[in-house]
Amino acid sequence: MGDVRIDLSTPAGRRRGRNAGPTIALVALAAIAAAVLGVVYSPLRDDEKTGPSAVAGLRFWSSGDSTSYYMSVSLTEALTEMGAVPVQPEPEYRQGSGLLSRDFFDWQTHIANDVAATRPDIVFFMIGANDARPDIDLDTYRAEVATVMDSLRDVRYVVWIGQPHMADAGLAEAVLELNRIFEAEAAKRSWVRYVDTWAATSDAGGSYAPSLPDEDGIAQVVRADDGLHFTPEGGERLARVVLAELLD
């Protein structure tokens, strides 16, 4: 990987600070988790896969491309308050990265070696925005996704987060193709759960939503001006979706 380093600056120049209120909401949401009987290593649909009934003491890692950053921030705060242990010193992401740009940043090797060495119990991974392009070879991409998922077989819970709705119509269409691959490959592996984020980042009519109503019905800006990245509030919403899927 040469001298490439994890970029800890915030996406699109957004702020990193947040108040404690949303984190408490995340913890409350996670508290509704159902009891788990154990991880079964046989093909299961996502709705048949079980998550942990409690996360206290579990080690977790969360990263991906720059769409993942604020989600990782909220996940880290919520899970840490619940007693889980982050294996990273702080939330991270790799701006401009993807599974098809190994010369820039080799996620495949990083996950198989560096991440695996930290022995996480839970892995959250969100990738694809920089891979989504019209000329992509979907068969090649499917093979790369499978490689990463298989390298995480010893992780108790792998949560693969799909890419959100995008403002650009062409990018949105390409992202949907990749999301289908993520979902299909996760379905083949009992240790991987795919989390769809498309509906959660769309309005009531199914269109891209730069703003969405909060719990009080007040419009909340959830996406950055570039139509790609999330605001801190949007990242928190995404984290709620992910936690609800993990702890169902």
Image (cartoon, helix red, strand yellow):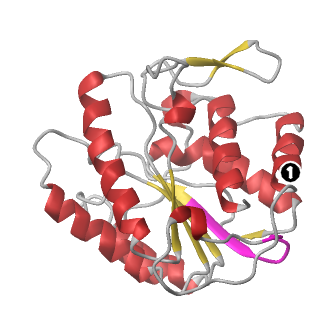
Q: Name which residue lies at 50% across and 74% down.
A: 44
As displayed, is residue 17 above or below residue 65? Answer: above
Q: Residue 167: which quarter of the image? A: top left
Residue 199, how many percent across, how many down?
A: 52, 34
Q: Quadrant of the C terminus?
A: bottom right
Helix, strand or loop: magenta stretch? loop
Q: Residue at the location (32% across, 72% down)?
A: 146
In the displayed structure, 231 sits above or below 86; it is above
Is residue 1 visible in the rendered image? The answer is no
Q: Residue at x 79, y 59 (%)?
A: 79
| Element type at mark 1 | helix
* Whether residue 109 is situated above or below residue 210 in the rendered picture: below
Task: Look at label 1 and name its amino acid.
Answer: Val
Q: Residues within 10 Å of mark 1 (few under 14, many from 20)?
A: some
- Specify whether residue 37 is in view: yes
- Observer-nearest residue: 207 or 160? 207
User: Is 239 placed above or below 170 here?
Assistant: below
Q: Position of residue 58 (x, y in %)?
A: 76, 76
Residue found 28% across the figure and 23% down from its top: 169
Rendering coords of residue 81 (x, y %): 88, 58
Tell me the magenta residue range: 53-62
